[in-house]
Image (cartoon, coloured by chain):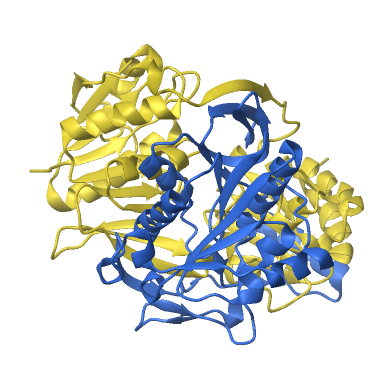
Amino acid sequence: MAQGILAIGELNEDSSLASVTGEVLAVARKLAGATGAQVSLVLLGKNASQRTKEAIALGADKVWVSEAEVLHENQIEAHLAALAQVCKAADPQVIVAGKSLFGRDLAPRLAFRLRVPLMQDCIDVNTDPATKRVVAVRPVYGGNANARVASPVDPQFVCVRPKIFEALPPNPSRRGEVVQAPVSVDASVVKVKRVRRVKEEATGVKLEDARVVVSVGRGIGGPENLPPFQDLAKALGAALGASRPVCDAGWLDHSFQVGLTGKTIAPEIYLTWAISGASQHLAGCSAAKNIVAVNRDPNANIFKEAKYGVVGDWKKVLPSFTATVKELVGS
Amino acid sequence: MPINIIVCAKQVMDPETPVSAFKVDREAKRVVPATGIPPVVNGFDENAVEAALRLKEKAGGGKITILSLGKSFVNDVIKKPLAMGGDELVLLQEDAFEGLDAFTTVQALVAAIKKIGQYDLILCGRQASDYDQAHVPHGIGEMLGLPVISMAANLEVKDGAIHVERKLPDGYEVLEAPMPAVVSVSNELTPVRLPNLRGIMAASRKQPTVWKAADVGLEASALRSGLELLDLFIPVSEKVCEFIDGENDEDKGRKLALRLREAKLI
């Protein structure tokens, strides 16, 4: 009989533990808390066995590892084949994955390979006290509505939105077991090959990691109006972000896009200018600690999520705001 | 070499529907379509149609089949991919398809794809703007045992293989897969052409092929979502915005900065 919870871990290119791993472990522990189930983590890739202590400290009772060479790069077909084998061996009742860049392709394919439905992009996960089954909440219609869903079959497969669940504080005294994953993957499963990979040096503060983000919407009018926002971002040591229309119009590259189909960020301060706050945009910044909004329309949706708001024309608000910021931060 | 492409396109509620017009029937667990706002072809699926048209033009021939699944369609809406230049439209139409989740949708689409038969590529939008699951393309690939590449910003056929450019947080990569393959297309593949008059005329003369579930070997009464939908609700924000007032906009800007400093945020 299926039992326990299997969390799917992820390693970064440098073999460090990807942040999503701590998040899926926290979710798995939360679910285990209700049923007393064992939490296993599967960790595949180069030097995976060097990360098991860290994984146990973050909540794993058991870690399945494999350092098979075919798994060294995060090649999806190799990882899928391996994970399907681990799932068969572990026979979990619940699988928890994270919707990272890798996970967003991996989780749906693994679910279909196991022939079970997937609860995708979840922002809340609980155990039904009566049935002891997983109940997950996922935004639909661009975040305009939430659906509460459950899977009638095991393994119940949950994929969580990144940066919503916080990793547990590491507890180095936690004990856990490490086992070799029964993985045998032939290199012939790999059909998709990387032809090239080009790294573009980002200038300034990285959007995903920034403490402060200055973000602009369609209402700024055009790319010619970007410099004063870049100036403000510089004064605050902030990253620049944008809504989808700004990127679709080509005023800024899509790497600046915050939202459902852009980046998910969780800064301390998210300063939005002329962003109306469509649900699709809020989906990417709802984890921001403080949203500050400047918009001409007092009924703009962004004010429903904002902590501080100014109803006004950005052209008039921005110069005095930036000047005062510069005085305050002394630059 | 001519290229045959199937593009999966979905008719969805207009995602630009204002938040104030967005309503949920909690009892029936479904979204109430806003009156006066017609549905649209899912935006990302239009990117996929555009990708197909470019590939066919480059190949110098072939056929683009648009495949759509749903309970009912608005003719002018679902014919847009034909007006853009698509060759054929197959509608998989059944009352039981309403509200069906991705798990079962995939199985119906796969059955239709098998019936269509010949294809070098299956293209989908990266996700639909209603359920936002982004896993129909992955499911189709898994069920058909085909390679899957998601989030294409650009596609090119080279020596019988498909080359796909994908944006990454720190740059981009180009992946290669043998064909047939499934590729999901992102909004970075732009511009999406608008239908011209000739295209609209041509589309108006074309009749879609309509298949019922039984036509692709499925039993309509046996179709069930994979997941149980327990509740559908509009989330309520508990945040209260503190509005900064001032004599004029300049004054508000200054006071906002001072307030943020007072709150120790800057």
- Quadrant housing residue B19: bottom right
Spot occupied by residue B44 in the image (x, y as percentages of width and height): 62, 55
Colour assignment, chain A = yellow
Left or right, residue A76 beside residue B191? left
- Residue B213 in sight from this viewpoint: yes
Return the x and y of residue B132 as percentages of the image width and height. Answer: 50, 58
Q: Which residue occupies 19% across, 33% down? A: A88
- For residue B131, side relative to residue A1 (left or right): right
Which residue is situated farthest in the left direction here?
Answer: A1
From what the image shows, is residue A283 above or below residue B19?
Answer: above
Whether residue B242 sits left or right of residue A331 in the image: it is left
- Which image quarter: residue B215? bottom left
Whole-percent x and y of residue A40? 22, 34
State the residue in front, A50 or A114: A114
Q: Quadrant of residue A38?
A: top left
Q: Nearer the viewer, residue A106 or A192?
A: A192
Q: Up-down: is B106 above or below A278?
A: above
Determine the residue positioned at 89% across, 54% down: A225
Name the spot of residue A226 as percent of width and height, x first.
Answer: 86, 50
Task: Identify by letter the chain in blue.
Answer: B
**Which residue is situated farthest in the right direction here?**
A224
Answer yes or no: is residue B125 visible.
Answer: no
Residue toward you, A212 or A140? A140
Q: Residue at x 59, y 38 (%)?
A: A209
How many numbered discs, if any?
0
Q: Is residue A294 left or right of residue A12?
A: right
Quadrant housing the N terminus of chain B: top right
